């Protein structure tokens, strides 16, 4: 039995801080989704990869110079396989670059030449594809793009009722931690955030460090974080 | 200030940076993170991405060209493209290693693979396990040796990623680049043209099974055994070559 958490001002502050951080990223993803639909809708026939170049000013702006960009390390649109006429597999994906302008690393992907390029099995793709409005994938080791321990937030992109891909953003766990740790540390007892599966995302104790798993141990109260697939777990 | 102390604070040797870039790209090509024929970003973009000067990047690309891992074409549609070198003659490749080096590489790889498997058993969740079983299913269905080898590499990287450690995962990728092609050679020598023995498949199943059961000790033991068995066979091959 897991006790339902009652009102606790410090816990509410954590929930608020997490919602603020996630809402900011999801708001940017809403913009990417709308811009993708806007740049593909007017086109007669099947779109091509170059059509997605229209997204770049928006993607670069979300990687540079705003409060949000301190969280977002990569952002873009991932096409459903077969959407584009000239690239069966394609990411319009941009990553921050401390030395200058954002950079695009992966473009054409061909799963027949590399065992790593079929992206349709990753949770950040399957979540939105199966209808989830807001997916938070991870924490996981992102060996495909950044080699970092990351979260990927994603939303579905739908054009005229048809799923055409995913708008997504990468947030490094260490940055998410910096955003929420001050609030977590104000809770006097053990407190940590977990994802829907129970993986710890951030914590105020080494006992439940990010990456470990909370499997419903007794003696903890679990409270949802808004409608996000995250929960705040507190002792006592 | 004495000379030695002065050297400590002198700029990092630019050849070290070239080597670092060569190693990074060569690793990615060797394990298939960058695919054969794939176009690399422009030199300026790649230099910015890696945080090195364009000059350093050009030197690194030149070294990769010499190793046959990158091909540069001029003119329209030009640029730098990934080339996965075709297999060297196994004997030639293996002769480059002394037995002692093979043993040491195997020890290092077994330590990393074992530690990663143990942590994966402690920490993995259904979303980490699904990729492992998918890779094993695809391996069981694969007939072409190249595809089998890529899937084998992916399986072991997925195990490392399930440990939740970015460093262990990076080390697994690096070691696959160093010793992966050689270990595969030993698998092929054992398994003939199929490139995979039933024993190897059974070890993969045992690793994934122990991780799924959350049995860290067993996961570590079978992951180490998997590497050490292949290393042992490789050393046998190497010893025979010397005669």
Image (cartoon, grey):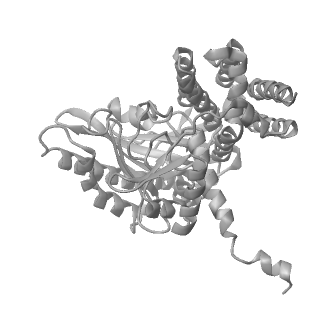
Q: Residue at x 39, y 46 (%)?
A: A107
Q: Quadrant of the C terminus of chain A?
A: top right
For the residue pair B99 and A71, the one nearer the viewer reads as: B99
Residue B192 found in image quarter: top right
For the residue pair B151 and A195, the one nearer the viewer reads as: B151
Q: Residue at x 82, y 30 (%)?
A: B238
In the picture as drawn, the residue positioned furthest to the bottom comes out as: B1
State the image coordinates of residue A152 (x, y, percent, origin top left): 45, 45
Q: Quadrant of the N terminus of chain A?
A: top right
State the image coordinates of residue B90 (x, y, percent, origin top left): 70, 30
Relative to B209, is B232 on the left or the right?
right
Q: Residue at x 14, y 44 (%)?
A: A43
State the image coordinates of residue A172 (x, y, percent, origin top left): 52, 52
Q: Residue at x 53, y 30 (%)?
A: B127
Q: Does residue A156 lie above or below B15 as drawn?
A: above
Q: Does residue A177 lie above or below A168 as drawn?
A: below
Q: Is residue A88 visible?
A: yes
Q: Does residue B131 lie above or below A219 as drawn?
A: above
In the picture as drawn, the residue positioned furthest to the top comes out as: B198
Q: Is residue A5 visible?
A: no
For the residue pair B156 and A183, the one nearer the viewer reads as: B156
Residue A83 found in image quarter: top left
Residue B57 found in image quarter: bottom right
Report the label total. 0
For the residue pair A41 and B100, the one nearer the viewer reads as: B100
């Amino acid at each position: 039995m897991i006790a339902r958490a009652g009102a606790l001002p410090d816990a509410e502050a954590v929930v608020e801080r997490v919602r603020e951080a996630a809402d900011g990223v999801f708001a940017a993803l809403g913009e990417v989704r709308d811009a993708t639909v806007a740049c593909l809708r007017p086109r007669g026939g099947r779109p091509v990869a170059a059509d997605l170049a229209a997204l770049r000013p928006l993607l670069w702006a979300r990687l540079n110079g705003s409060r949000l960009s301190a969280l977002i390390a990569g952002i873009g649109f991932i096409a459903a396989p077969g959407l584009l006429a000239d690239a069966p597999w394609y990411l319009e994906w941009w990553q921050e670059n401390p030395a200058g302008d954002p950079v695009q690393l992966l473009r054409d992907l061909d799963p027949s030449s590399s065992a790593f390029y079929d992206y349709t099995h990753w949770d950040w793709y399957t979540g939105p594809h199966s209808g989830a409005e807001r997916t938070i994938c991870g924490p996981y080791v992102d060996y495909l793009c950044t080699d970092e321990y990351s979260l990927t937030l994603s939303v579905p992109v739908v054009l005229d009722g048809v799923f055409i891909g995913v708008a997504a953003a990468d947030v490094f766990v260490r940055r998410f931690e910096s955003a929420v740790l001050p609030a977590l540390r104000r809770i006097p007892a053990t407190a940590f955030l977990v994802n829907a599966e129970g993986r710890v995302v951030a914590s105020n104790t080494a006992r439940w460090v990010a990456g470990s798993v909370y499997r419903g141990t007794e003696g903890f109260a679990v409270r949802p974080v808004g409608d996000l697939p995250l929960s705040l777990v507190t002792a006592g | 200030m004495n000379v030695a102390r002065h050297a400590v604070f002198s700029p990092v040797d630019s050849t070290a940076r070239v080597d670092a870039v060569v190693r990074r790209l060569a690793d990615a090509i060797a394990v298939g993170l960058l695919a054969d024929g794939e176009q690399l970003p422009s030199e300026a973009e790649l230099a910015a991405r890696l945080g090195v000067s364009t000059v350093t990047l050009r030197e690194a690309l030149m070294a990769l060209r010499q190793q046959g891992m990158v091909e540069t074409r001029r003119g329209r549609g030009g640029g730098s493209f990934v080339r996965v070198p075709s297999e060297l003659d196994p004997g030639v490749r293996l002769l480059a290693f002394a037995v002692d080096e093979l043993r040491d590489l195997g020890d290092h790889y077994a330590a990393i693979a074992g530690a990663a498997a143990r942590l994966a058993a402690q920490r993995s969740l259904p979303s980490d396990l699904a990729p492992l079983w998918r890779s094993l299913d695809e391996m069981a269905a694969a007939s072409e040796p190249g595809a089998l080898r890529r899937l084998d590499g992916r399986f072991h990287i997925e195990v490392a990623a399930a440990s939740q450690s970015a460093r262990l995962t990076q080390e697994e990728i690096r070691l696959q680049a160093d010793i992966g092609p050689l270990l595969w050679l030993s698998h092929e020598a054992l398994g003939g043209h199929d490139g995979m023995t039933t024993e190897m498949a059974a070890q993969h199943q045992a690793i994934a099974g122990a991780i799924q059961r959350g049995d860290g000790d067993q996961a570590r033991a079978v992951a180490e055994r998997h590497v050490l068995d292949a290393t042992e066979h490789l050393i046998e091959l190497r010893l025979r070559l010397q005669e």
